[in-house]
Image (spheres, coloured by chain):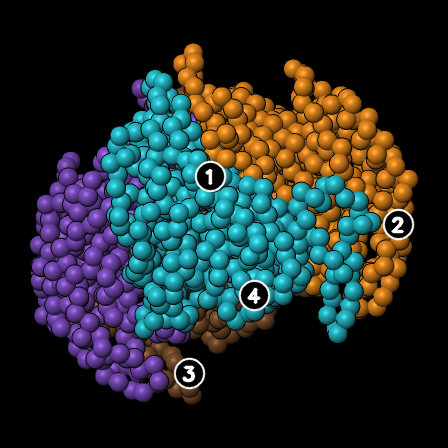
Chain colours: A cyan, B orange, C purple, D brown
Amino acid sequence: MSNSFGRILKVTTFGESHGPYIGAVIDGCPSNIKICEDEINELLEKRRPVNQFFSTKRKEKDRATIISGVFNKMTTGAPICILIPNIDVDSSYYEEIKGVLKPSHADFTYYKKYKNYDYRGSGRASARETAARVAASLIAEKILEETNIKVFSYLYSVGDIDIVFKEEDFFEKIDKSVIFCPDKKAEEKMLKKLKEIKDEKDSIGGAVGFYIKNTLIGLGEPIYNKLNAKISFLLMSIPGVKAVEFGDGIESSKKTGSLRNDLFKYENQIFHTLTNNEGGINAGISNGEPIYGKVHFKPTPTISKQQKTVDTQGNKKILKSFENDRHDVCIAIRAVPVVKAMIYLALADFYLLNKAYGM
Amino acid sequence: MSNSFGRILKVTTFGESHGPYIGAVIDGCPSNIKICEDEINELLEKRRPVNQFFSTKRKEKDRATIISGVFNKMTTGAPICILIPNIDVDSSYYEEIKGVLKPSHADFTYYKKYKNYDYRGSGRASARETAARVAASLIAEKILEETNIKVFSYLYSVGDIDIVFKEEDFFEKIDKSVIFCPDKKAEEKMLKKLKEIKDEKDSIGGAVGFYIKNTLIGLGEPIYNKLNAKISFLLMSIPGVKAVEFGDGIESSKKTGSLRNDLFKYENQIFHTLTNNEGGINAGISNGEPIYGKVHFKPTPTISKQQKTVDTQGNKKILKSFENDRHDVCIAIRAVPVVKAMIYLALADFYLLNKAYGM
Amino acid sequence: MSNSFGRILKVTTFGESHGPYIGAVIDGCPSNIKICEDEINELLEKRRPVNQFFSTKRKEKDRATIISGVFNKMTTGAPICILIPNIDVDSSYYEEIKGVLKPSHADFTYYKKYKNYDYRGSGRASARETAARVAASLIAEKILEETNIKVFSYLYSVGDIDIVFKEEDFFEKIDKSVIFCPDKKAEEKMLKKLKEIKDEKDSIGGAVGFYIKNTLIGLGEPIYNKLNAKISFLLMSIPGVKAVEFGDGIESSKKTGSLRNDLFKYENQIFHTLTNNEGGINAGISNGEPIYGKVHFKPTPTISKQQKTVDTQGNKKILKSFENDRHDVCIAIRAVPVVKAMIYLALADFYLLNKAYGM
Amino acid sequence: MSNSFGRILKVTTFGESHGPYIGAVIDGCPSNIKICEDEINELLEKRRPVNQFFSTKRKEKDRATIISGVFNKMTTGAPICILIPNIDVDSSYYEEIKGVLKPSHADFTYYKKYKNYDYRGSGRASARETAARVAASLIAEKILEETNIKVFSYLYSVGDIDIVFKEEDFFEKIDKSVIFCPDKKAEEKMLKKLKEIKDEKDSIGGAVGFYIKNTLIGLGEPIYNKLNAKISFLLMSIPGVKAVEFGDGIESSKKTGSLRNDLFKYENQIFHTLTNNEGGINAGISNGEPIYGKVHFKPTPTISKQQKTVDTQGNKKILKSFENDRHDVCIAIRAVPVVKAMIYLALADFYLLNKAYGM
């Protein structure tokens, strides 16, 4: 496996869904950054299921512990290890369905590739693992505090219901919604849809939007480690992602150059573009305009309905229905803070790299 | 900059559009692979503009030279350096527009980030650089010859014209089309559209599809270096890409789990899925089904129409029209072999890594 | 900081001397390797101070816990996190000498580089950290079990007393000595010397030898990641190392080629060399002969005598004498198992890499 | 193989002794560094054989060409590819001894590991390859120009003749000696010894010293990527190196702590140590004192005397005498500029990394 990423700021995560802990080691962190466990726990709180009808009932109130790299409440430059205990884990269901291949899930490929794998709660492949990423992202946020960069992520769509941007304080409204949806009207429809899907013992896909304000000019390392390439890499590693778009994304392929090109202007000694179809990135480097895009999530593969499948021996099986409350109706919702976390981690790494070059 | 990728098979490229050479160094290559320059030149031939009306007129008949790593026509394990001379380069136009920021182009960010950059033909940011990637991909193809893996890429759409899959020998038809489009009807419409756009001195976006046959089970390294994540990274690094999709991609976000999940079956001692919405990847690891997806390209930012812009000093400028024949009408066309090249390079790297684990 | 190493088998360590835990994450481990905590604890037992007069009294009976990556007592391919609690830590002495620069120690450079650092027991710079390396090395040993490779390390010298090779079962005697010295006569002299040094409240340098039996031919990746280069890198990272030699090492520089060259012979279908001055490595690649060399350690910088120094403000200070029992008389002794651990980790990594190439 | 090193400043080299070119790609270089081919050629001139009796007669007047990454005589941030043609190569001798294993040489291990290898002039394993490292080091020197760091390397010993430090302008005298020996008396003895060895058709070992003036405090990344560890790695990768020492090196293992510890003083607002046994490095980080050490080289394995050996089929062979003028009497001499080059490359990389952290 490959459980590390980052060039200057290196993140390594570990732990399985039903093991004692999940955790992260963040290495290459600058010293003298103020950091405390409460701040990590606040971030984790946003990510955890909130006992809403659309999320799993698992009461995993996460309490992270920093076990290294912080002294007198400040980072020392040493690797920061964060441990998050797994509590409220009940493996009985997984013992019952042991060997049965869950459709569109990790079972089959993990079984084939690794032979021995922790099938309980999907083990290492569980979305539970993303809590460690979110915890690690606090360090990235802190590193970027000396800039004005601010990353937002929000629920863009549930099934075919999507949001409409309009208000001034659009992004500030994200946290007021239980589903991270800043468009009140869309939120209502989404919640209604989620309820229906839940009642049908089904799941549904969704998309997460991201928006980066006050971007510095010059983040990203072409030709390969482009800003969009690296962010795509990190977003595609989130469980359930099937597509990533930057700027006008897929729509760009339908347009003509003369209508789509972002023309430059120069005002008040600042370069700007009249439009921002590129989503703030030219040739893999941030141009100072807002960076935005979308991440598309498939429906949760775990559903409460019964499904026909086979086991690892090839025997036909009926996959027992999951308890209705042990899975998310729409994984995109819980992924919203994870998208933000991964982007913060990418940006902090590029930011430190720019500093190496005096940029 | 960051001009290397790959973990076992490491590729480093170099060179600017109007410099004497572009090239690649491929390190970590197994020894005893038969390789010759003619094979590289064949691959390059597919990538180069064919003097069709929709491509640049630059007569860059590329002739690659292998200057290291091959002895007695076989690889030695030593780094393979491939040089491709830049011929037929005329920098006069670029001298005329020196300092003028081309919209949606690399000029602005390169200027801001690096201060000194080779503006001639976009320098390092030129799509010309992708020839080195294509040359390097021959090594990857050769490494994978001991498997049956076969990667196809094709022109999926031009503007809003897209193809329809139907025939048995669909992928075999790709190379018969001057625009890599295996659907004859769509090809006609596309060529017509390209002609119109050309006459309007404009450019247009397009999408490239990819399809991997006879995939091995078990390629990809979760949690971060997932097969889809790494391929996305490499595809997003191709100039002009704004979105990458795997399997049903964006559509997945609109579906319900019960209808979308790929159910397993077991027939003739082989596991298969009844559908393949996931595009052959479960939890970041190939499951043996065909891997497929799409890459969306923006319209060529260089157009023959005049455009309003500013120069690096902030002065308003009119960007002179480019000669009609010095740019591609639709970059997606020329990118078709590049998409294939990047996927081959990703697969070969994962394949070697699997062998390290006896997989 | 940089707390990871390894290319296929990646080791990341974390933790400070007086923090709650030290630990390691081993990523890239093959699945299906049988492993248990008891085996790690056995390795740690060898490394820990044994309450001999020459070692610190700290009763750190280490008990490692594996918190991820192992399921049903077998590795799963997922990252293995090993935690080792720090027990019996008393920071009071370090609070007393806070800010006083210990000569030839980490204080000054950590203070200057990181500003905020955990000065208690040298924090991250403590030799305590090497326990995590030793724990991680079990994985490497296990990976190499399918070969016959066997790594030995032993105390080669204390001050100017060094050992003489003679017996057949030389290396098997290492573990019978409390100071890892397989030469009984030398051991006696060394213990006497250590006692004297201890009584003088001083410390003394020493050297550790290593010897690798049944080496495979072909380990090592020139031109840069040569077998000797990588092992040197890892050995030089052990606290207190000032020199590393391979084969006849320093003596080689005094010899002539005609007398020193290792001539080849071919017997019983096997290539051998008549002599082994190269120490089993030609051009950075193992040649199948035993690999051997030496690692030279400075005397423990912490001594029980008082020393003149300054504090971080530049004020003259007398460094209080350390309690006689809180430091090692000769760090080379405790480093013996660490040298073996680092070599195992290097070899396992090269071994997996060779498998990637079908070697 | 593994032909790259460096974390921020990445160097990749390629090319064989008897191929058309050797070369280097330097990636991650800051932009706006003034650089020209003449400066590279000056560095190469120092490394090349000077037709002295003790060096090979090969008249390889190297002329490097920069083919990318430099525009208007300044770096652009793009990868810099430097090509050095191999001229005056005569492969006839190597064809004659094809398949015969040269003792203490690369033949055997390259043959066994790679099967197909370029045996002409040792191919990739040739010391010729170090010319590319020297060329690359110019970039490192330039990056460090904004500091006062100055690296010196010199011939420390030939066989058992070694130098004595005395004069003020010791290091400035290095370049006045044809064998890079700043001690006039030792130089005379060395030249006499070299002549004798030459006349005996033999070769001899030697050691290279290094000395770094005006070091910054804080270079090096513990726990693994320590300054001494990384420099050792790079020095051990130079052909013929058998040992590396820092500070008092091997002698340190014979000393007591009370006599060896470097005591701190504070004068004129600067911290210094009264002695410098550590060689300017504490706990893997530079402490501001001069960094010094030694690198020990074995005698050139190629000698003009006949040697008994076997061929790759195991047949007994007499290795024909090499022409007296086609090999170096003492490889340490030609390695002097290479040692300096590798240290500059290590320092520049750590320097850029420190800047990432605002150090």
Q: Confirm whether residue B63 shows in the render.
A: no
The residue under label 4 is: A149
Per the image, label 4 sits on a secondary structure element best described as loop
The residue under label 2 is: B305
User: How far apart are the two marked residues, 1 and 3, measured between alpha carbons?
Assistant: 70 Å
The residue under label 3 is: D270
Asked if marks 1 and 3 fall on the same chain, the answer is no
Asked if marks 1 and 2 fall on the same chain, the answer is no
The residue under label 1 is: A197
Q: Amino acid at mark 1?
A: Ile
Q: Amino acid at mark 4?
A: Ile
Q: Residues within 10 Å of mark 1 (few under 14, many from 20)?
A: some
Give whichever of discs 4 and 1 has the lower sequence position. 4
Q: Amino acid at mark 3?
A: Ile
In the depicted structure, whether residue B324 falls above or below residue A83: above
Task: Read off the chain for label 2.
Answer: B
User: How far apart are the two marked residues, 1 and 2, measured between alpha carbons?
Assistant: 51 Å
- State the residue at coordinates (68%, 49%): A248
Which x, y percent locates residue C261? 39, 38
Which x, y percent locates residue A194? 47, 44
Q: Confirm whether residue A122 shows in the render.
A: yes
Asked if marks 2 and 4 fall on the same chain, the answer is no
Asked if marks 4 and 1 fall on the same chain, the answer is yes
- State the residue at coordinates (48%, 61%): A175
Which x, y percent locates residue A92? 24, 36
Query: Mark 1, mark 2: which one is toward the viewer?
Result: 1
Tell me if label 1 and label 3 are in contact, CB under 8 Å: no
